[in-house]
Image (cartoon, coloured by chain):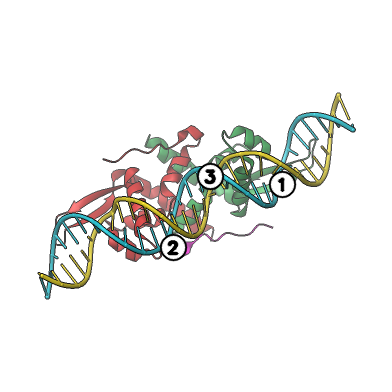
Chain colours: A green, B red, C yellow, D cyan
Amino acid sequence: MTTQKDTDSASGCPAEGLLKMLSGKFKPQVFRLALDGPLRFNTLLRQIEGANKQSVSVALRELEDFGLLEKKTINLKPLHIEYSLTEKGESLVPVFRQLELFQNNNQ
Amino acid sequence: MTTQKDTDSASGCPAEGLLKMLSGKFKPQVFRLALDGPLRFNTLLRQIEGANKQSVSVALRELEDFGLLEKKTINLKPLHIEYSLTEKGESLVPVFRQLELFQNNNQ
DNA sequence: TCAATAAGTCAAAAAAATATGACTACCCAA
DNA sequence: TTGGGTAGTCATATTTTTTTGACTTATTGA
């Protein structure tokens, strides 16, 4: 069971919670890769340069805790695990795109 | 003179730079307060509960470094300093609002 | 002239985030 | 039955961030 994180609206800043859920080592990259399809642990480790197990593990767990990704066991060929976008995760996509857009418009 | 920070598009994730420029202690709050008008150091210190000089100082300096805020000396009554949104900062506002919106739609 | 306010800086300490390397457990193929 | 892949965990470093408290410089009002 995954626990729901406090999004800290106590600070009087609603955006803060969202910002927190996407900050942390490798989280933006992981989320971005999730847009292209389900993720696998070892694949991520190879895809993200400089990545290490621990941090990738933390990134996946936290994205899952925030309800952006969901973990599934795939009972196929080589039995494995996949992380894919939840509905909440999907709903974040346009927002994420806006972040990219802003960044691109500002070099 | 303020130095331009590397927005790390090397990670292949454009959003990462923006995320970084808004994460860090008190940065979301400070940015949000800037939407309501110019900021002053000691006022922020009183407004943000739990704030300390050093962190507020770092938040302001980094927001300035990223070009979201600009620092001005105001030659009035009690001579003081104000931090206000730059054009770039203004252009971030709608993006920031989207973040808040997302957060509000997800409790 | 004294005390307060404004806007910080600096060094050191404490806390939080990341990285490293060893280890686990399971499955599968040769 | 040995070796490789998958998906991690765990304890311990190392690094980065944040906090604390002392100190500074200049202005201002009484």
**Nearest-to-viewer mark from 3 and 1:** 1
What amino acid type is highlighted by mark number 3? Val
Helix, strand or loop status at disc 1: strand
Question: Residue at horizontal 78%, vertical 39%?
Answer: A79
Which of the two labelled residues, at mark 2 and mark 3, occupies the earlier sequence position? 2
Which quadrant of the view contains residue B2? top left
> The disc numbered 1 marks a residue on which chain?
A
Q: Is residue A87 visible?
A: no
The secondary structure that dominates the magenta segment is loop
Label 3 sits on residue: A93
Mark 3 and mark 1: span between their CA atoms?
21 Å
What amino acid type is highlighted by mark number 2? Ser
Mark 1 and mark 2: span between their CA atoms?
34 Å
Mark 2 and mark 3: span between their CA atoms?
25 Å
Label 2 sits on residue: A11
Tell me the magenta residue range: A1-10
Q: Are marks 1 and 2 on the same chain?
A: yes
Q: For the residue carrying disc 3, how many other residues have a C-alpha within 10 Å: few (<14), some (14-19), or many (20+)?
A: some
> The disc numbered 2 marks a residue on which chain?
A
Looking at the picture, how far across and down is residue B102, in whole percent?
A: 49, 54
Looking at the picture, how far across and down is residue B29, in whole percent?
A: 39, 57
